[in-house]
Every structure is written in C-alpha cells, then in structure tokens.
Amino acid sequence: MVRWQGVFMDFYGTLAAADREAVESVCQAVIDDHHLDVDAADLAVRWGHRYFDEIEAVNGDRFRLLAEIEGDTLIETVRALAGTIDPAPYIARLNRYLAQPPLFDEVHEVLGALTLPVCIVSNADERELQAAVAYHGLAFHSVVTSESARSYKPGPGIFEAALQLTGWPADRVLHIGDSLHSDVGGAHQAGIRAAWVNRGGRISDIGTETPDYHWTDLRPVISLQDP
C-alpha cells in the first residue's frame, strides 16, 4: 500500500461544479443576441473542442491566459454563423461563474476528514480560482494554477511545478480530477498516480487513459489515508 505524502486535486469539475451550465448559458446568450439557428449544447461542444486544442498549444513561452483563449476561441467558433462578435460580455459572464461556483455536496465532509495535505492543480487563471477559494472559505496546503505554472494540463509542466512547490515525490502523490485526458493523462505523464472522479455531466472528454482509481465522488480518498 502506498504511504501517500500528499494529494493533488483539480478544482473545477472535481471540487466545484464544472462550467457546463455556465458555458451553455453563455452559448444561449450568443444565440439569442445574434439570432443563430443552433443548439446551445452543440455550440458549447464546438467551442470546447477549439478551446482545448488551443490550451494544449500555448504552454511555456507561448503561454496565454484562459480569459484570452476563451474569448478568441468563442470568436472563432461563431464566426461562420454570426461574423465577428465582441466576446467580452460573454467571457465576463463565464468568469463571474468561475469566481463563485457551487461546491459538490461532499466537499466539506471530505476536506474536513483529510489529514493529508492538499495542493490544488488547476487549469485556471489566478483571479477566478483564488476568488472561488476565498468565496467558499477553503484552505489548502498550496495552489498551482496554469497561470502560475505557465502550463496547462495535460502537459506535465503544471504537475512538475506542483511537485517542486510542495517538495513531495511523484510516487507518493495522488492526483484527483474529473478529466481522463487532462487529469489522468497529465498526471501519468508526470509519473503521478491518478484517480478519476467520474460524476458525469462534462461537456466532452476526449481522454482514453486508464486511471489508477475510478470513483463517482471524492469520499473514497478518505480511506486511502494511513490508519
């Protein structure tokens, strides 16, 4: 049995409700404002594919903030349908959600029962994630965002930054996340075991990686602690 030294956790989709509802709401606003003949859920999937393609192309020296990527990929997604739009009001709406997302029901129970230190490892801009942590009164050992690491999951850079910050060895860390592609695949690239929290409800997930653990919520992590 592994004697875990610490836990890495994704934030959106793992601790806080993912942004599917917010993204589809933004897409519906775009549809309404520009009189588009398309379904909001379908537009959200199209936007999501462009978004994920872009974040995987901008690590390191080419790094860009999520807010910029969200805006540019929204423009690209709707250009053929509506011409060039101003994405600012739509991205502001999305980021208001990201700053105050609802937590999943078991989060306070699980964090209260964990004695292992938790480091958040999230594809997020600093402003929205720190606002969300403060909004819910949460406290973690450390927080690593894509902005602070200048790296997006599934690239290993963000995980390597978290390992360096915490000082924990990779073989003594478990990463927990809701994406097979970004969380499980990214953690494995960095030599870290991964638990997949499969709650359902993601807009899409292109991952095919095999997690070390497969859960439907966060409660099983409690049993992984040393007695």
Image: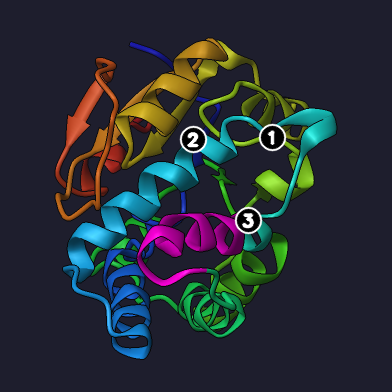
Left or right placement of residue 79 versus residue 95 in this view: left
Q: Residue furthest right?
A: 61
* Residue 53 image label: 2
In this view of the protein, which residue sits in the foreground, 167 or 73? 73
* Residue 66 image label: 3
- Is 19 placed above or below 194 here? below
**Magenta highlight on residue 82:** yes
- Is 155 placed above or below 114 here? above
In this view of the protein, which residue sits in the foreground, 58 or 80? 80
In this view of the protein, which residue sits in the foreground, 211 or 125? 125
Quadrant in which the N terminus appears: top left
Q: Which residue is mark 1?
A: 58
Image spot of residue 98 (x, y percent): 50, 72
**What residue sits 19% from the left and 63% below the top?**
41
Quadrant in which the C terminus appears: top left
Which of the 4 image quadrants contains residue 213?
top left
Q: Amino acid at mark 3?
A: Leu
The kind of secondary structure element at disc 3 is helix
Q: Amino acid at mark 1?
A: Val
Which of the 4 image quadrants contains residue 216?
top left
Q: Is residue 26 visible?
A: yes
